[in-house]
Amino acid sequence: MHNGTTLTQFIIEEQRQIGASGDFSSLLNDIVTACKVISNAVHKGALIGIQGSAGSENVQGETQKKLDVITNEIFIKSNEWAGHLAAMGSEEMDDIYSIPRQYPKGKYLLVFDPLDGSSNIDVNISVGTIFSILRSPKGMSQEPVTARDFLQPGTRQVCAGYAVYGPSTMLVLTSGHGVNGFTLDQNIGEFILTHPKMRIPEDSTEFAINASNERFWEAPVQRYVDECLKGVEGPRKKNFNMRWIASMVAEVHRILIRGGVFMYPKDTKDPGKAGKLRLMYEANPMSFIVEQAGGASSTGRERIMEMAPADLHQRVPVILGSKNEVNRIISYHAEPPKASEAAA
């Protein structure tokens, strides 16, 4: 028997303290239900024939896995019926998803990446779900919601969270009052509070970046990584470890547990793209979580949460994690380029 605080109990108590309505608690419960269903599907994997390519592409032109399509449908079906949402936006869909006419409309908007890191699913590496809740500018009005209504800066998020489907399933959540982590107890089907008031150490000796893109990085990022790799003999006077999982959920979760910095910076690999990660579905919710845990998040040039979104699927550079490391990288971006760099 487990005497810990369940996620449902935690949500109700937290919302009671800040005077929020029951709609928000109920919406979170629907999201949690979707994460439980996805966890079950992910952990069964090849046993039920849901690995491999779906033979389709998402709006960004990326090959969809079968589980991308399945988890997107799970999230929609779990959240469309209860009357808490005005509309949804998903990384896997071109346009917003309007709530069907037979269901009541609510005052919130939900954006999500149903299966972050899905390229890892066939090799049994941790994947996850990322979500963010916004208020609909139209409130409880029955006026149709448009994509423009979603284009709110990250500072307006009501709540953000992620589920990580690893050796255990965890859900990490913030509604602007710190960050808390919950572990799914498979025996009772409940998430239990196991990581209260999570904090990211301000200093770290770990960084995560895709080193194969080094030749495309901007000078400030090249400088930072080079200094880390030089270890105790270099200007940082300490040794660093490099990590790369290629699953943002797994990378951020490690940083929340023990610190570090995660970078998917601006580069010249594809000049037509401002960055790799999506502002609405990945960068904003993860930035909210990281900042609430005492970390920092930036493009290198501006705070991600203050960016005004221009498009539902906008991409941005992302540098987040331990505050002192992120601030160091920001300071390198702020320095004027050397003559050799400017010429290049």
Image (cartoon, grey):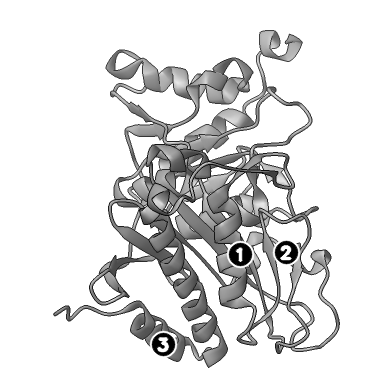
Q: How many dots with numbers?
A: 3
> Farthest residue toward the right?
143
Q: Amino acid at mark 1?
A: Glu
Inter-mark Cα distance, 1 to 3: 27 Å
Q: Nearer the viewer, mark 1 or mark 3?
A: 1
User: Which residue is found at the position 50% from the left and 57% from the top?
Assistant: 129
- Report the residue at 55% width, 25% height from top: 221
Q: Secondary structure at mark 2?
A: loop
Task: Look at the numbered disc 1 and give the secondary structure of its residue.
Answer: helix
What amino acid is found at the position of numbered circle 3 in the picture?
Answer: Ile
> Which numbered marker is on residue 12?
3
Q: CA distance from mark 2 to mark 3?
A: 26 Å
Of residues 172 and 266, which is closer to you in this image?
172
Q: For the residue carrying disc 2, how many other residues have a C-alpha within 10 Å: few (<14), some (14-19), or many (20+)?
A: many
Q: Who comes first in sequence, dot 1 or dot 3?
A: 3
Q: Which residue is mark 1?
A: 73
The reply to whether dot 2 and dot 3 touch (C-beta < 8 Å) is no
Relative to 173, is 109 on the left or the right?
Answer: right
- Give the spatial CA distance, label 1 vs label 2: 25 Å
- Please state the horizontal and vertical placement of residue 334, each as a whole percent of the image: 63, 32
Q: Nearer the viewer, residue 35 or 284?
A: 35
Residue of label 2: 152
Whether residue 232 sits left or right of residue 165 in the image: it is left
Which secondary structure, mark 3? Answer: helix
Which mark is nearer the camera, 1 or 2?
1
